[in-house]
Image: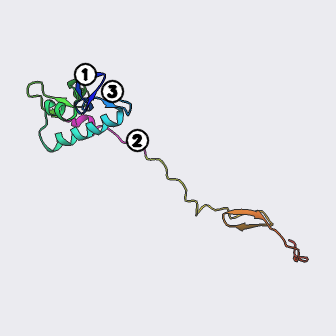
Amino acid sequence: NAIPMFVGAKKRWLKRFFDITSYGDIIEKSVARQSREAIAIASRIHYEGYTATEAFFDFGVGREWLRRYFIMDPETKKLSLDRARYSSWEPPPKDPEAPNPRIYTKLDAPRGYARKGNKYQKRKYGHSAGGILY
C-alpha cells in the first residue's frame, strides 16, 4: 500500500512519522497525537527502562522532540522524567460549581402569576370564572 507522491514509501511506515489525511496528504502529527505519544512514552519510562531508540522505533519521535519533554542520558540514550519540574507544577484553580437549578427557583412570582411547568405565566380564566379575580 504505497502513496503515489512518495514512490517506494509504504503508508504504514509513513504513519509512524506523520498524519495522513483521507485524501492521502501527508501532514505533521497533530497535537492530540503528540500528547498521546508523550503520555505513552512517560508511562513506559515510569514502569520500565526506555531509550530514545525504542521511542523512535515505537512512535517515530526524534531526539529533539524527546529532549524538549524528557531528560535523556547522552551516553546510554536512556530517558527519564524531570521530577523537579513536575513537582513544582501547581494545578489551576478549580472553577466554581454552577448553582443547582432545582434549588434556585423563582419563589416570588408577581401577583396574579401561576406556575405552570417550569414557566411563570399569567393566570388564564375561562368563560365560567364568574367573579373570581384577584
Is 70 on the left-hand or right-hand side of 134? left
Is 21 on the left-hand or right-hand side of 43? right
Q: Which residue is mark 1?
A: 7
Amino acid type, label 2: Pro
Which badge, 2 or 1, comes first in the chain's sequence?
1
Q: Nearer the viewer, mark 2 or mark 1?
A: 1
Q: Splitting the image into 4 quarters, where does residue 130 fall?
A: bottom right
Q: CA distance from mark 1 to mark 3?
A: 19 Å
Residue found at x 29% / y 37%: 88
Which badge, 2 or 3, comes first in the chain's sequence?
3
Task: Answer whether labels 2 and 3 touch (C-beta < 8 Å).
Answer: no
- The single residue placed furthest to the right in the displayed view is 131
Q: Splitting the image into 4 quarters, where does residue 32 fall?
A: top left
Q: Position of residue 2 (x, y in %)?
A: 26, 29
Dot 2 alpha-carbon crowd within 10 angstroms: few under 14, some 14 to 19, many 20 or more = few
Q: Nearer the viewer, mark 1 or mark 3?
A: 1
- The single residue placed furthest to the left in the displayed view is 76
- State whether residue 118 is above or below residue 97: below
Amino acid type, label 3: Glu
Q: Which residue is mark 3?
A: 28
Q: Which residue is mark 2?
A: 92
Q: Nearer the viewer, mark 2 or mark 3?
A: 3
Q: Position of residue 131 (x, y in %)?
A: 91, 76
If the image is split into quadrants, where does the N terminus sit?
top left
**What element does badge 3 sit on?**
loop
